[in-house]
Amino acid sequence: MTKLNSHRILLVHPLGYQASAAKADIARKANLMPPLGLASIAAYLEENGKKADILDCFAVPLTADRRFKTYLEMLKPTWVGFSCTTSSFLDGVRLAGLAKEILPGIQTFCGGPHVSALKDKLLADYPAFDYFVIGEGEETILQLMDEAENCAGIPGLAFWNSRGKTEFTGYREPGVELDRLPFPAYEKLAGFPKIYRLPIFNYPKAPNTSCISSRGCPYTCSYCDRSVFRRTFRFNSAAYLYRHLEYLKEHFGIRHVNFYDDQFTFNRERIKEFCQLIKNRPLNMTFNCAVRAEHIDGEILTLMKAAGCWMISLGIESGDTELLSRHRQKVDLDFMAEQVHLIKKCGIRVKGLFMVGLPGETTSSVQRSISYLKSLPIDELNVAKFTPFPGSPLYENINDFGQFKEDWPKMDCMSFQFIPNGMDREEMEKLFLEFYQAHFKRPRTLLNYVAMVKHSPDSWLRFAGNLGSFLRFARSSENRIIK
């Protein structure tokens, strides 16, 4: 048998669909985010004496399989790990099987929200994987590489035991201390930062990237999967956060960052200190973030604006109070509207995050959401098609609320896999398209995009270069892939 390198590992972000369709994938054209979880794991493993590399199939879809095979044949790692969402999981299964064909002695594992939700029950159905990493990956993967012969003693692991049965060792407690982690290994991402770009019109300057400064969320919304971090909430200190941005600027020329945190302002004192650090030592960078309406006010918004905050995303989800009250806590749409106006008053752009198709959704509730949208001074809009992911509270009894087609590769919030009782797919698609059209036909929206010629010239260049694809997508809400 071929001798393998026990200290070398390849970390893979699967594409999830046919590589030949990548050129027509509107999602890739509009937004390509670096796999920050894998970059964090790679940095941690390297710091602890391992040789870790990353293959992001989204970044190089047409050559990903060839690169994967070449890496295994030339460097012969003992380990190959995959980070999978629900939609990319089966592609991870395919690649894990291919890895075992190329190197029969290789050890394969998978992490991410899909396997963290389903654990060892899923492992039994997919023997291409030797292990599942449940929850956060850094410490568990390092321990696995060093102590694979003692799987039962490694927390956060599902594995095949000596009796040929699957077993879950339980959660790793406590979670890793985030300030102890090295900065993600951005340099291991092919083409970084140029190839990775934020959504069009969501940034003022390029190059730009995403950054994560906290893990978890303390809230329990019915539609959110909390399998990886569960209900914990931990965050980097303000000083670490400042050094992270400084590192991105000095090493990669980054000029704008999107904080991909669920709750950027949840810890108020951290944000105040962070803003003060930037005031004392300006980085001349801008940033976006996502917040809950309860965790912002005039004081913190003013500080954030002065520190370079360019846009804030708010999870509004629905403009129907009764529907929303079934799925999240502290529903007050009047207060939400006040906070949107407050953000605008402080000179920060607003992105509204909505969702169509929640259990209980009706034609009337979607129309109320559209009316609510029209009442708000929102600059950017994202409307997701509700998808009941494994690990979300709704998943276990979702069939009580409508028709659910659990087709994993299509569970990416870009197609209606779930149709609420009393609705049909054709009506849902029509309402979804109407939602977006209601925003883009507003005079204020059109004027806003004209202004982006000055405020985000790189976005206009990208838009013009892909105009045909965007126009075709605007006429059809049914697929993420433009045929």
Image: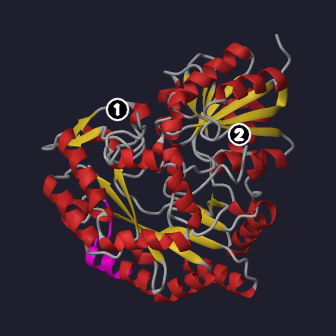
Query: In terms of sequence position, does the residue under pointer 2 or pointer 1 come before the other?
Result: 2
> Identity of the amino acid at label 1?
Glu
* Residue 442 in view: yes
Classify the position of the C terminus by image quarter: top left
- Judged left or right of residue 85, residue 478 is left
C-beta proximity under 8 Å, tags 2 and 1: no
Mark 1: few, some, or many residues within 10 Å (few <14, many ≥20)? Answer: some
> Identity of the amino acid at label 2?
Ile
**Residue appearing at x 31%, y 77% in the figure:** 337
Residue 331 is inside the magenta segment: yes
Residue 453 — which label?
none
Residue that carries the numbered disc 2 in the rendered image: 141
- Judged left or right of residue 234, residue 466 is left
Q: Position of residue 225 (x, y in %)?
A: 44, 49
* Residue 265 in view: no
Mark 2: few, some, or many residues within 10 Å (few <14, many ≥20)? Answer: many
Q: Position of residue 57 (x, y in %)?
A: 62, 36
Which residue is most to the top?
A: 1
Name the image quarter holding residue 480: top left
Q: In this orientation, which residue lies closer to the viewer: 146 or 412?
A: 412
**Residue appearing at x 44%, y 68% in the figure:** 449
Magenta span of residues:
328-339
Above or below, comparing residue 242 to residue 435 in the picture: below
**Residue appearing at x 68%, y 68% in the figure:** 255
Q: Position of residue 410 (x, y in %)?
A: 40, 35
Above or below, comparing residue 165 to residue 347 in the picture: above
Residue 63 is inside the magenta segment: no
Above or below, comparing residue 128 to residue 13 in the picture: above
Q: Secondary structure at mark 2?
A: helix
Residue that carries the numbered disc 1 in the rendered image: 406
**Nearer to us: label 2 or label 1:** 1
- Judged left or right of residue 431, residue 439 is right
